[in-house]
């Protein structure tokens, strides 16, 4: 599956710059999903496609430590949501900014509702069956690692 909307928003915030400065280092960003729910569907799409379900969830992004003003972060997040949010996505963002000992902030943004469509395509051997037809994720929906860490040791005999 492609990245979730909360992951895409996090990547956007990691990459933006304001007046030549990033909001924070990429290692200072974290994101997660809370309170997810699935709404089943069986809507046929594009001939052999199927909208199998809609996944609704709250998305959270944390930045710690963060020296950028919370209003700046919220403005970038708000505009991203307005440009990239879907019909079922909330455009309201809750945020908190707790001051750390070094006068940086721990910023947390919460979007109360994001929606992801789970789309499948009909195949002969797919693992998902509905009304006698088999379905699978399409090639464009497969998970692909963007990076990985290879650890090993070299020993000499």
Image (tube, rainbow, N blue to C red):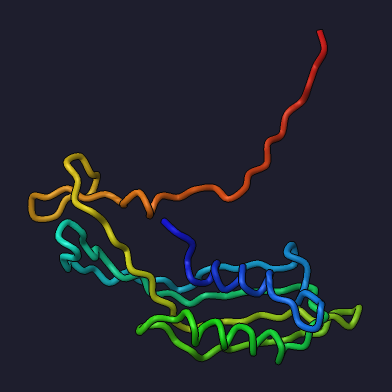
Q: Measuring 17% from the left and 68% from the top, which residue is drawn there?
A: 43
> Eyeballing the image, is 144 above or below 105?
above
Count the marks. 0
Image location of residue 82, percent across then percent down: 49, 87
> Eyeballing the image, is 40 above or below 114?
above
Q: Measuring 51% from the left and 91% from the top, which residue is drawn there?
A: 92
145 or 157, nearer to the observer? 145
- The answer to which quarter of the image holds residue 86 is bottom left
> Eyeballing the image, is 50 above or below 99?
above
Q: Measuring 19% from the left and 63% from the top, which residue is drawn there?
A: 46
Image location of residue 145, percent across then percent down: 54, 47
> Eyeballing the image, is 22 above or below 79?
above
Q: Residue furthest toward the right?
A: 102
Image location of residue 105, percent across then percent down: 80, 81
**Where does the C terminus fall, quadrant-wise?**
top right
Q: Is residue 111 left or right of residue 117?
A: right
Q: Is residue 46 left or right of residue 67?
A: left
Image location of residue 84, percent across then percent down: 47, 79
66 or 97, nearer to the observer? 66
Q: Residue furthest toward the top?
A: 157
């Amino acid at each position: 599956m492609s990245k979730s909307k909360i992951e895409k928003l996090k990547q956007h915030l990691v990459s933006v710059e304001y007046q030549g400065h990033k909001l924070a280092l990429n290692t200072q960003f974290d994101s997660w999903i809370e309170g997810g729910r699935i709404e089943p569907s069986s809507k046929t799409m594009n001939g052999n496609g199927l909208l199998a379900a809609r996944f609704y969830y709250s998305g959270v992004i944390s930045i710690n430590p963060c020296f950028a003003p919370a209003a700046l972060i919220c403005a970038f997040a708000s505009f991203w949501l307005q440009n990239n949010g879907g019909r079922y996505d909330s455009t309201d963002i809750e945020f908190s900014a707790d001051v750390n000992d070094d006068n940086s902030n721990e910023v947390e943004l919460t979007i109360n509702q994001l929606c992801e469509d789970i789309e499948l395509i009909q195949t002969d051997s797919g693992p998902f069956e509905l009304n006698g037809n088999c379905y699978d994720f399409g090639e464009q929906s497969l998970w692909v690692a963007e990076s990985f860490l290879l650890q090993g040791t070299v020993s000499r005999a």
